[in-house]
Each structure stands twice: as C-alpha cells, then as structure tokens.
Amino acid sequence: PTPEARADEDDGPVAEMPEEPAADVEHVRVSLRLPSGQRATRRFRPSDTLEVLFAVASALSGKPPDTLDVSTQMPKRSLRDAEGGLAATVKDAKVGGNMLLIETGKRRRETQQ
C-alpha cells in the first residue's frame, strides 16, 4: 500500500452508526455540522457517553473517530476537553440543543495521560 493508505490504517476504522433512541424515550437532540457543511440532527440518550457522540460523528463524516474533533460553537470548546473526557455523558457535557461542529484532520493530543 501507499504511505497514505498506511497512515489511514493507523487512525483506525470508521465507527459503525450507533442505534438512535426512539422519539418516545427520554433523549436530547443535538445538531451536528459536518465538515462538508451539511447538517444532521440526532437524538441521544442523556446517559450516552461522548464516545457514542464521536462514533456518530465518525459514521456521518466517514472518518475514524481519532481523527475528529467535535466542539461547541459558542464558546468554542472541544468535547475532548470535557470534564471526564469521552466517558462523560451527553447530559453532563450539556450538549443537548446545541449545534456541534465536527472537524477532521485533528490528531488526538498525545500529551494526555
């Protein structure tokens, strides 16, 4: 394979789209703006972790989760920096009702322990 193909393999696979909760169960709605400019609205359980949100971002954008950043717009805040990291819940990260920005080409910061 070419060096580019090998580099892509190092980032891991694109995530499978997690199942969306039904409209009649408790949920929060999150709007996502994709790198292409398209928008998607998605329901999450309040107990879903940010890892689930990143999996949705990965499936929507076709990019591996480790290459993505998802952030709030105002104030701009990366969800990777949320208290509790990707194990934080959607409820605790207070992302319900927000427009989140999915950005690609962001390498996960290696400095985090």
Image (cartoon, rainbow, N blue to C red):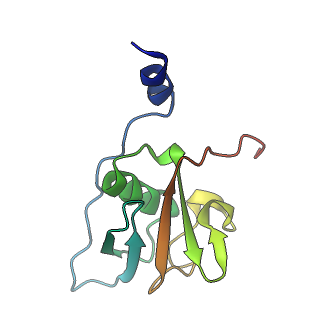
Q: Is residue 4 above or below residue 83?
A: above
Give coordinates of residue 112: x percent, y percent.
Answer: 75, 46
Give coordinates of residue 73: x percent, y percent.
Answer: 57, 78
Identify the residue at the far top of this view: 1
Q: Nearer the viewer, residue 51 or 78?
A: 78
Residue shown at the point (30%, 57%) measured from the top left:
18
Q: Is residue 49 left or right of residue 39?
A: right
Q: Nearer the viewer, residue 3 or 10?
A: 3
Q: Is residue 11 left or right of residue 22?
A: right
Q: Is residue 106 left or right of residue 9?
A: right
Q: Nearer the viewer, residue 103 or 25?
A: 103
The answer to which quarter of the image holds residue 88 is: bottom right
Give coordinates of residue 37: x percent, y percent.
Answer: 37, 67
Q: What is the count of numbered marks?
A: 0
Q: Is residue 4 above or below residue 77?
A: above
Residue shown at the point (70%, 45%) measured from the top left:
109
Q: Is residue 56 left or right of residue 91?
A: left
Q: Is residue 104 above or below residue 85?
A: above
Residue shown at the point (48%, 83%) measured from the top left:
98
Q: Is residue 56 above or below residue 94?
A: above
| The C terminus sits in image quarter | top right
Give coordinates of residue 103: x percent, y percent.
Answer: 51, 58
The answer to which quarter of the image holds residue 1 is: top left
